[in-house]
Image (cartoon, grey):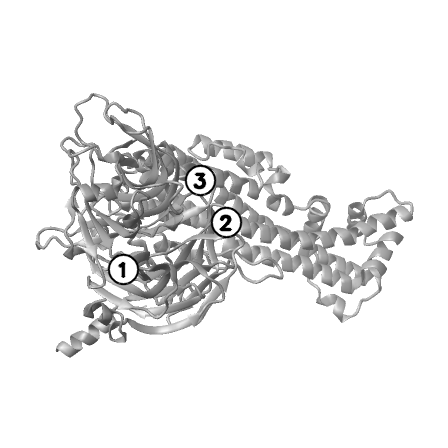
Amino acid sequence: MGDVEEEAAGDSLAFTLHLDKPLSSQVDKASWNPDKDLLAMATRDHQLIVHRFNWQRLWAITPEMQVTSLCWRPDGKALAVGHDDGSIAIHDVENGDVLRQIATHDTAVECLYWAQEGQEAADHGDDVFCYEDRTSRFFPSPPHTPPMPGMASNFDMSGVLGHVAEDQSQANRKNVLRAAQQRLYILCSGDRNGIICLSAFGVFPIGKLDIRDLTISGMVAEYKSVAKPVSRLLDASALEVSLSEDLRNMTVICSGAQSVESLQAMAGAESRASGLYAISVDTSLLGDRRKELRQVALQASSVEELLEVVEGTVTVMRKHWSEAISTFEDKFRSLSTLLLEHGSPVKPRDEFLSLLACGSASAALHQFLAASLGEAGLKRLAKSIDTAGRELHNLIAEHLQPAAEIIAFRVGELRGLSRWRSRLRRIGLHETLMEDAMENAGMLLVQVERLLRTVSDTTGQFRLFFVWLTKSLRQLNGDVGPQANQLPAIDSVGVADFLRTHFERDPVGPHLAPASDGLVVDIKPEEEARIVELAIMGGFADTKFLSRTLSSQIERLRASCQEAFAMPVKEISPNLQARCMLLLCPLSSSLPPISTVPLSLTYFEVNSGSVKEESRLEDYICLRVQDDASAADQNVVVIVRDFSVSDYSLPGGAKVPEVLALRLEKSLHCIDLALYKQRQVILLVSEKDLEDDEKTIQTYLMLLQLEDLEFTPLSPTSSPMSRLPLLHLCSTLEAVVDVGLKSGKVRAIAQLDAVPPLAVSASRGLACVFAGQRRALLYDLEEDEEGQDDEME
């Protein structure tokens, strides 16, 4: 090696090594938190681990399913994790708790990308649609699902929408919540079957794209023949996906076999070409309707979360009440047995009515009250019913009713938005469906109010019954002391009404019964007639809703909301159209699996240089290409930029993508790569012994400035490019640059057996390199530059 290369291998040119730590298992996936010094890793022993900068473990969990992809939310407060069963879990950054588990895919989730609406897009001057979420003006913080009896509180899931997770004052919480709602987060996920799903805030589906069903134009703009070739990508599998901050462009990297339907214009080309492809997708509808999508997603996601709160609260209430009422029924069931043993065919209710009317009890009733039950047992039973009644009242007042009110308000807001058809209908907010959901939300409010009155009345009647029964027991026992006079006066009419209506029939249980039981709640004829009159005056069209149980009404509300909230996917998905497709590299049996190809995809913000002109987003695709036709091609890195904004279907073509091939020195081999900040690329390369390819001399991190390199436009009219590998195109266009240890910024690293993945943090200027001997090395990519600047000063 030359003098410069020897310096590159020296300690003086090494990046600052912050730590070198052993690993319990090799790492398969790694991703830096964009806002904090946290590194998330998925290991081969099926652990999901998050480490701090000093390598202190923040938390570690063992998911039930194998982790196949990782991605941090742009604010750094949540981690999306894809699994091989198609599910996506969103974990809290602080403790790893699952905020939400969603199942949007049927097979392994291979890639995740969380896009954040850019500040310029959020502050854009489009004030035609200006809407503020007014819920916080009229309601306190939304309730959470109460814990089951004997269990700890459920985890707060509000963080899934960007709500704050830290302990803050109420004012600060509202301010942070408003700030989080100013931008739209979209989680993009791709699976092995070529399905791309888009979810607002990671929980509300807004789009779905099946790559295998796309008809894609080739990289050809002008044809003399009438039949223009249209391609399909068979057996597609998504590998990487990226969405621009303006939400108008999406790039998908996938493997598959291209099938061209019209071969007349592709003379001499094979019918299929298996390889790695880049697909540009037009998502301009998301950018045009970002404000509407943000509000619909926030409202709808909140409704779905609150529906879970309502369902969970009803389950907890059912548990409390069923335990208390079961104890009551078990105790008084023994009275029926005693009456039969004494030869009396009278029902217990009639025995108590006789005691209330005459003041005398039969032998069986006296034995039951004095011996079987006793005053102590009667007090415990009364306390059990009274406690359950108070618990139900509190659960309704603190959880069920507030949740139902916020649901009704949010559904009403969505119904109001749906009436602006010109803007909201295009993203799937249908007025008719929202009207149905609004009516069901109103019915739920009425039923909750009725349940509250029923619980209060029933608890009061039970209290009257137990007071009277306690006083009667003392009188039967001859207790006429001062203690007997401490009990309140007896309401004989109230006790008689309880015995006739509630003693043998649970008045609360049917309201809380599961919807699967198919129970019907009895309503009085006068109430039904009043509902019919209200319907004529503009009330609910469904006049039988009061006969449904609370769970049945919740089920109807959920079904109507699901139908309404499923429309955005149906309306938006057809508008996600592919612009064009580019073959990146071919596949063959002699090449390594496509999953081992180093690949990086991102968007950079590029300033135009003019104050008047806005900055634009420029996408970059970077990968190591391989071609079994030439051994020299094993060490080539190809970079494509401006691919997502190209559209060759337009007359004369639009802005064309530009390409560049970096041909590494013969001794260098690219292990992994990552696009870095300010249009830079970092290559992790190993230097091999030319006489022994198995022997590694040194391992380097190479940092190249892309804006210093000369890219070459892909001319759409030069040749039928859609079927040619990208490396061949670069050679044809003479867009190949030789790269060696003298190029760019090259630093030697401590380990010779470096392996993927290369984890780079653009916000913190860090790189984590993993070694085959299960070690992690953390390098500072910026500190040595600062030192040089200080020396120059």
Q: Quadrant location of residue 253?
A: top left
Measure how far apart labels 2 and 1 are at the Cα level: 45 Å
Front-most of residues 530 and 43: 43
* Residue 649 against residue 304 in the figure, above or below: above
Label whose residue precedes the other's in the sequence (2 or 1): 2
Q: Which residue carries the number 3 mark? A: 561
Label whose residue precedes the other's in the sequence (3 or 1): 3
- Secondary element type, mark 3: helix
Question: Is 118 on the left or on the right of 190, as rendered?
Answer: left
Q: Which residue carries the number 1 mark? A: 682
Q: Amino acid at mark 1?
A: Ile
Question: Is 136 on the left or on the right of 785, as rendered?
Answer: right
- Secondary element type, mark 1: strand
Label whose residue precedes the other's in the sequence (2 or 3): 2
Counting other residues with Cα less than 10 Å from the Cα at mark 2, is it few (<14), some (14-19), or many (20 or more)?
A: some
As drawn, the residue found furthest toward the front would be 691
Q: Is residue 496 among the parts visible in the rendering?
A: yes
Q: Which residue carries the number 2 mark? A: 308
Question: Is 455 on the left or on the right of 536, as rendered?
Answer: right
- Label pair 2/3, CB-CB below 8 angstroms: no
Q: From the top left corner, tell me how far across and down residue 536 is, in percent.
A: 45, 30
Q: From the top left corner, tell me how far across and down residue 232 is, in percent.
A: 33, 31
Q: Identify the mark at residue 122; answer none if there is no mark.
A: none
Name the residue located 51 percent from the left edge and 49 percent from the top edge.
310
Q: Amino acid at mark 3?
A: Cys
Counting other residues with Cα less than 10 Å from the Cα at mark 3, is it few (<14), some (14-19), or many (20 or more)?
A: many
Name the residue located 45 percent from the left edge and 42 percent from the top edge.
105
Q: Amino acid at mark 2?
A: Glu
- Secondary element type, mark 2: helix
Q: Quadrant location of residue 221?
A: top left
